[in-house]
Image: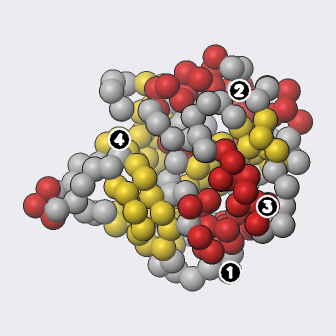
């Protein structure tokens, strides 16, 4: 079972529909028990780091999510679902993440003379840094859709799967074993994003 975690901070139906379009069913789940039973987990998210992590903990989702990852079962984080994997986020203060990966989540510091706005919103290219299974069959520098004002900085560069340039390179996806997470939104990235969802479903 592919489980899409409902903790109140994501457009879950668009992710579910994306899987359906590539021939896979995915259930939207809302209890810790559902997470424990899942073969594969998708953790999407939009909004503030602090609120999202607090919601996961209050609903009892944090521990089963971490256990799922520790067992190296397939996991896909999207946007906030990437950011919350790290030790700490610096959005409106300093907030502890799930601590699955060492590193931090920080706000874009872009050169305003380049006419770059924060949040980073719209289409941008991926620069491949590893052979992440999410990218199987896709060309380098394919375009995907972003909406975010913060980005992650991993302690271990070996987890970086892709970078993207926005006033300088930032980490746009990570990969470690069956743990995959993206700063961009595959469900909003048309054919490229649908191919990625298919690749994840086949893990």
Residue underneath mark 2: 61
Point out the tag, 1 or 2, that comes first from the N-terminus: 2
Q: Earlier in the sequence, mark 2 or mark 3?
A: 3
The numbered mark, 4 or 2, whose residue comes first in the sequence reads 2
Element under disc 4 = strand
Q: Which disc, if any, is residue 106?
A: 4
Cα distance, mark 4 to mark 2?
Answer: 24 Å
Mark seen at residue 85 = none
Question: Closest to the observer: 124 or 188?
Answer: 188
In the image, residue 96 above or below residue 5: above
Q: Dot 2 surroundings within 10 Å: few (below 14), some, or many (20 or more)?
A: many
Circle 4/circle 3 CB separation < 8 Å: no
Dividing the image into 4 quarters, which one contains the C terminus? bottom right
Label 4 CA crowd tier, 10 Å (few <14, some 14–19, many 20+): some
The answer to which of 21 and 107 lies nearer the viewer is 21
Vertical arrangement, residue 7 with respect to residue 153, above or below = above
Residue 116, located in which quarter of the rendered image?
bottom left
Q: Give the label on residue 137, or none.
A: 1
Is residue 97 in view from this perspective?
yes
Please state the horizontal and vertical placement of residue 6, each as a whole percent of the image.
69, 34
* Residue drawn where x is 79% and y is 35% of the image: 29
Tell which circle, 4 or 3, labels the residue nearer the N-terminal end: 3
Q: Residue at x 50, y 53 (%)?
A: 183
């Amino acid at each position: 079972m592919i489980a899409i975690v409902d903790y109140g901070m994501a457009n879950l139906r668009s992710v579910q529909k994306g899987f359906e379009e590539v021939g896979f069913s995915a259930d939207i789940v809302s209890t810790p028990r559902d997470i424990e039973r899942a073969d594969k987990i998708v953790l999407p998210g939009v909004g503030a780091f602090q609120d999202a992590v607090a919601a996961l903990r209050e609903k009892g989702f944090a521990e089963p999510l971490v256990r799922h990852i520790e067992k190296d079962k397939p996991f896909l984080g999207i946007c906030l679902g990437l950011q919350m994997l790290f030790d700490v986020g610096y959005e409106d203060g300093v907030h502890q993440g799930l601590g699955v990966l060492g590193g931090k989540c920080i706000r874009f510091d872009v050169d305003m003379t380049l006419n770059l706005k924060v949040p980073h919103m719209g289409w941008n290219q991926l620069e491949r840094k590893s052979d992440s299974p999410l990218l199987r069959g896709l060309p380098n520098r394919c375009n995907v859709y972003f909406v975010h004002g913060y980005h992650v900085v991993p302690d271990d560069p070996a987890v970086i799967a892709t970078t993207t340039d926005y006033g300088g390179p930032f980490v746009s996806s990570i990969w470690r074993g069956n743990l995959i997470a993206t700063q961009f939104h595959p469900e909003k990235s048309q054919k490229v994003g649908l191919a990625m969802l298919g690749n994840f479903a086949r893990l």
